Amino acid sequence: MTDQHISPLDQARILSEALPHMQEYDEETIVIKYGGHAMGAEDTAKAFARDIVLLEQTAINPVVVHGGGPQIATMLKRLGIQSEFAAGLRITDAATIEIVEMVLAGSVNKQIVGYINEAGGKAVGLSGKDGNMVKASKTTRTMVDPDSNIEKAVDLGFVGDPEKVDLTLLNQLIGYELIPVLAPLATSQDGQTLNINADTFAGAIAGALKAKRLLLLTDVPGVLDKSRKLIPDLSIKEARKLIADGTISGGMIPKVETCIYALEQGVQGVVIIDGKTQHAVLLELFTNQGTGTLIHK
């Protein structure tokens, strides 16, 4: 159904039905993680930006955290920088982190800021380095050496896990009609720039802000059961059970672990939704049906 077929009366009714939802989120902070693939084409990104401006207009405080994996891969390829992988994870060396920062804090960040501002918002593009917002420690991973069967540490290079979030800067922006747009980069204790997984970064920010909701926009509909049907609602306990029995597997495991971490830090609910769905954010927040999988305590 296109917008042209909705009568003015139906439009008014739809707006009226959104009222209790708007009241529930009034003056609340909502952290939205916008993924590299979920960004999609320009029209998708512009529609997302409009939805974020709409949230801000209804007295919700949105904070956007974005990824940029596909854009980083494109730029590394353009510059002929070969990436090494260990245990399926990219090793970020000195040459790579320079490009990662350029793409994340530069082109991707400012593109999203531009779209939000074009839609009438006031977006401010930052990274976790600004105002010492996020301090991180280097990530260590282990892998089992196939020859000797001995577990050994893998150095992933300039990759980090968030350790401490300082809200000084965000508190100057949130609630003042400004929309923070954050690139997932942080500084280590010795001043090195570290790249952080965008889901993990968003979880840390949402936890520190005690956000009402963390929305993870991904390229899947949410958490699926064994028969590939969407699970609309999960408690932490149920989620852990589904990880243990293998229902939640692969790349969904770290996503769900991020959700659990954020909930334990004080976020009220975390939703994994398909960012490619039109108006996914509005569907989740302002309608009775919601979308994706809600994970709660």
Image (tube, grey):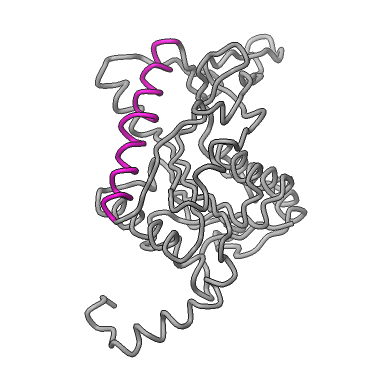
Q: In which quarter of the image is the N terminus?
A: bottom left
- On screen, 170 above or below 177? above
Which secondary structure is most common in the magenta stretch?
Answer: helix
Asked whether 31 falls inside the magenta stretch, the response is no
Give the residue at x 50% y 65%: 284
- Residue 74 figure quarter: top left
Asked whether 116 falls inside the magenta stretch, the response is yes
Give the residue at x 22% y 79%: 4
x and y, in percent, of residue 256 in the image: 63, 46
Q: Give the range drawn in magenta.
A: 94-119
- Residue 71 figure quarter: top left
Give the residue at x 54% y 59%: 228
Report whether 21 appears left or right of 57.
Answer: right
- On screen, 225 above or below 151? below
Residue 125 shows up from this direction: yes
Report whether 150 appears left or right of 160.
Answer: right
Give the residue at x 61% y 24%: 136
x and y, in percent, of residue 191 in the image: 55, 13
Q: In which quarter of the image is the C terminus?
A: bottom right
- On screen, 74 above or below 261? above
